[in-house]
Amino acid sequence: MSGPDVFETISQNLTSIRGQMATAAEMDGRKPDDVTLIAVSKKQPDERIDAALAAGQRVFGENRVQEAQMRWQDRRAQYPDLRLHLIGPLQTNKAGDAVALFDVIETLDREKLAVILAKEMEKQGVMRGCLVQVNTGDESQKAGITPEEAVAFAAHCQHDLGLNITGLMCIPPIDEEPAMHFALLKKLANQAGLATLSMGMSGDYETAIRFGATQVRVGSSIFGERPVP
């Protein structure tokens, strides 16, 4: 996807996805604007990002701090209502840069990172929203707090470290039915008294919304497949 058709295609994709999101929200007894669409822009060409911005999209998710810095620092000045979510793993040595750039950090997954984020936010004089990433499938290769530890960890980060913990996030195993993972995350969020549920991607965001998602992270269904380097 390139050339003059980029804006039209991405605008149509966004309209279609928002319509499907609205239907799913209504099936869950909620209003369409109860669910936020996070456009996953990692590794997408600039023309596709600009097309999404031109079509009115203002919430974006990035996986890597350095890539996001190059992509978004200048665009911040153009779009003051832009909101950026870090949705990829965060190394502790990038915590300061992440706090400076992102509005929300969705991948808080360990004590050491929580302590450093708290110090960086105090140092920079900002309070960013944070989500605890939960490894709902107990996958050894995947980041995230275990479901058994999630509620206590969220409370510790909030009450002992002073972080603004707004909710939970998960990425279900690719070879399992996602619905049971979404249900588990909602249960944990209810136990923790947290309102934000970031779950659901291009292939399952409608299911996630029906299970209570308040944020969905959609990339390829908006932008198309990422170009091969």
Image (tube, helix red, strand yellow):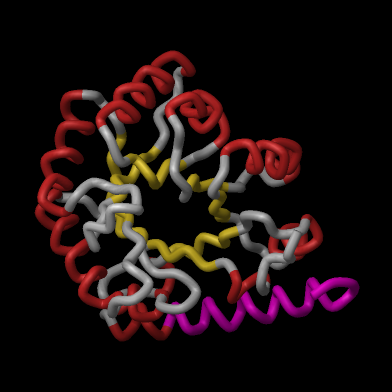
Tell me the chief SS of the magenta region: helix
Please identify the residue farthest to the top as the structure is shown: 123
Q: Is residue 173 left or right of residue 64?
A: left
Nearer to me, 60 or 94: 94
Percent position (x, y) of residue 20?
47, 83
Q: Is residue 43 left or right of residue 134?
A: right
User: Does 224 sit above or below residue 126?
Assistant: below
> What is the quadrant of the C terminus in the image?
bottom right
Q: Quadrant of residue 44?
A: bottom right
The residue drawn where x is 78% and y is 78% is: 8
Based on the picture, tell me whether residue 18 belongs to the magenta stretch. yes
Q: Quadrant of residue 23?
A: bottom left
> What is the quadrant of the N terminus in the image?
bottom right
Q: Is residue 215 left or right of residue 136?
A: right
Percent position (x, y) of residue 59?
56, 55
- Which region is colored magenta? 1-22
Based on the picture, tell me whether residue 159 belongs to the magenta stretch. no
User: Does 55 sit above or below residue 148?
Assistant: below
The residue drawn where x is 47% and y is 63% is: 217
Percent position (x, y) of residue 178?
30, 75
The residue drawn where x is 54% and y is 49% is: 63
